[in-house]
Image (tube, coloured by chain):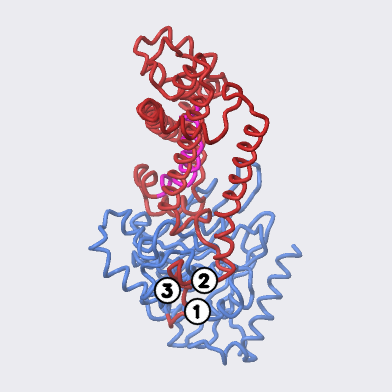
Chain colours: A blue, B red
Amino acid sequence: MSLALAPQTEADEPGRETAATPLVRLEGVSKVFANGTVALAGLDLVIGRHEFVSLLGPSGCGKSTALRLIAGLGRPTRGRIVGPEGAARGAVGFVFQEPTLMPWATVFDNVWLPLRLQGIGRREAEPRVGEVLAMVGLADFAHAYPRELSGGMKMRVSIARALVTRPSLLLMDEPFAALDEITRLKLNDELLALWRAQSWTVVFVTHSVYESVYLSTRIVVMAPRPGRVVADLPIDAPWPRDEAFRTSTAYNALCRRVSAELHRAMEG
Amino acid sequence: MARALESPPASLPAPAERAEPAAREDRLARILAPIVIAILVVGGWEAIVRVHEIPHYILPGPSLIARELVESWPVLWPSLLITVKIAALALAAAIVGGVGLALLCSLSRWIEIALFPYAVVLQVTPVVSIAPLILIYVDHTLTAVVLCAWIVAFFPILSNTMLGLASADHNLRDLFELYGASRWQQLRLLRLPTALPYFLGGLRIAGGLSLIGAVVAEYVAGTAGTGTGLAFRVLEAQYRLNIPRMFAGLLLLALTGVAIYLLFGALSHLLLHRWHESAVRRER
């Protein structure tokens, strides 16, 4: 299968049909930090409903900065961002590179946190917390403390916490980068299954070509100094994606193509 | 998502069933070794005193000190209670003052900039040199003595709690901001739990210091003071050349200090053992 740059037509490709209704729009967004570092220079990006977009690039290309700005953590120096309504009320879920759990709180209390901050009590939150914990396969660990869990399980808790508010947009900042290969591949599959079953949009920051090709409906390749978009590639590989896809020639061709774009980005 | 691939978390069995022979030996050694040292020192001391027939007003033997401790218990025990009361009041005031000021400092950088230097001044000025002044200006002697002990105990709580309140994980702070947490929610659900281990560390130091502060203040207050605390009894015994009673008083003070240390150590373990690295048993 070749990589098509034109909009493609496959019916079961979830990213396409609703791409016309944008969920997030970045218009000429620049971010300059206090020390003078230009993290982003005039970034234009439109993310459609139910897309799975990967921001791919070497470190320092501003991909994490872009993600944080979309989340509303910090303001752009120039330009504007139109995000989903009600970001502060849980319309946006954020998953950090580290699990970022409160060590003094149980798994339940960690996942309850976003609802708790909206004034939802423990009793009232119980069904929702139970539901997302079951979704990530941790229903039996509600009363465990984070230190009793493995790295992969902590990351599942972190994902459950991001999902508990039923967000329309899920932002993930290299969520699996610190995990071992086996756990990472497994979590990739689980994330894809969840995404296909639910109605969210995902923006996924990564520096792994293979991961981004496997997961995405679209890859935005970014380059550093200053951070900018250098290529915007739809990934038209068929669904479902599984182990067979990971070893297929189509997957390899896509990876080669994306790698080539990434190399061009890094050379200038 | 599918069932976890990883093995379930190691549940933590009761200490009794997981204590391997090596671990039990280790615990036994931890108790026995100090006891052996105590027996050697006390026995050696007693032997030297007896062999050289050292008079009791120069160096009393341990057996004489023990007898004195029992005989003067009706005098020493009420005095110990008074000293403990002074230390406890000072520590309570140090907790309220230290945590309160730390909270104020965390709310406003300007409060921190304006007040923190004076907290440092209070800390570095030797309490022995301030105590006489405090005793002049504060009429109520108990209040004056508590104030002296408070000065010594309050700084470790203040500085540790400040450090703890400022140590919240940056990503967690972002998460709270993302969900629109109020300042009060941030304080209650993030900053205070983060600060707890730091505060407890400060409390362990301050607990011992409040006793030292109480003793120093009593010494300075001397006969003009309340006149009944344990430190005063030691001073009184010195005037009367009752050396065995001096040793008995010192022994009681030392034991009290150890008790305070163990008490706060246990409190710290109780509050932190489920989650904090300092209190979690390592699996090997």
Tell me if residue B26 comes above or below residue B103 in the rendering. Answer: below
Q: Which residue is mark 1?
A: B7
Measuring from the top left, give residue A170's x and y in whole percent: 44, 66
The reply to whether label 2 and label 3 mark residues of one chain is yes
How far apart in space, not on screen, are marks 2 and 1 (Cα)? 8 Å
Residue stretch rendered in magenta on the structure? B190-212
Badge 2 amino acid: Ser
Q: Which residue is mark 3?
A: A50
Measuring from the top left, give residue B104's x and y in whole percent: 41, 31
Q: Are marks 2 and 1 in contact (CB under 8 Å)?
A: yes
Q: Are marks 2 and 3 in contact (CB under 8 Å)?
A: no
Q: Which residue is mark 2?
A: A150
Q: Is residue A34 visible?
A: yes
Q: Residue furthest left?
A: A124
Tell me if residue B156 comes above or below residue B275 in the rendering. Answer: above
Determine the secondary structure under disc 2.
loop
How far apart in space, not on screen, are marks 2 and 3 (Cα)? 31 Å
Q: Which mark is residue A203?
A: none
Residue in view at x 43 percent, y 31 percent: B98
Front residue of A121/A146: it is A146
Determine the secondary structure under disc 3.
loop
Badge 3 amino acid: His
